[in-house]
Amino acid sequence: MAAYYPEEPTADEEREMKTFFLLLGKFYPCESCARDFSALLKLRPPATSSQRALSTWLCWVHNHINQKLGKAQFDCSKLDQRWRDGWEDGSCDD
């Protein structure tokens, strides 16, 4: 979703994206997950000023949750390779 978000979103697109994440935090089916996600949103609200800002923010959220779960961190410098452009080694070309 963030990979194809506009680099220069309109005011409506920014508002709608922020609303999406606020509602996700409110209605996520796992109650403790929803509570944790809502707390993250208060700590660091969604960055919706550009595609890069939103992607970086979502990567931070992803890594924050993975750290809590004892999982590996994702290298945020590889966001575009993973979600938009494909891996530099061509492994997604087939």
Image (tube, grey):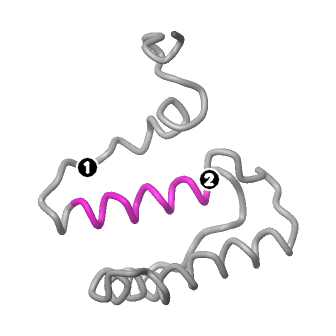
Kindly identify the residue that appears in the image at 69 percent across and 71 percent down.
17
Q: Position of residue 81 (x, y in %)?
A: 51, 29
Mark 2 or 1, closer to the camera: 2
Element on which disc 1 rests:
loop
Distance, label 2 to label 1, CA atoms, is 20 Å
Q: Amino acid at mark 2?
A: Met
Residue tagged 2: 1
- Which segment is the magenta one? 53-66
Residue 19, x across and y down, in percent: 66, 81
Seen at 32% across and 88% down, the residue is 31
Name the side, left or right, on which 93 lies relative to 51.
left
Residue 68 drawn above or below residue 56:
below
Q: Measured from the top left, where is residue 33 in percent x and y?
A: 31, 80
Predominant secondary structure, magenta span = helix
Residue linked to disc 1: 73
Instruction: Check disc 1 and give the amino acid type.
Output: Gln
Please tell me which of labels 2 and 1 falls first in the chain.
2
**Residue 58 on the magenta span:** yes
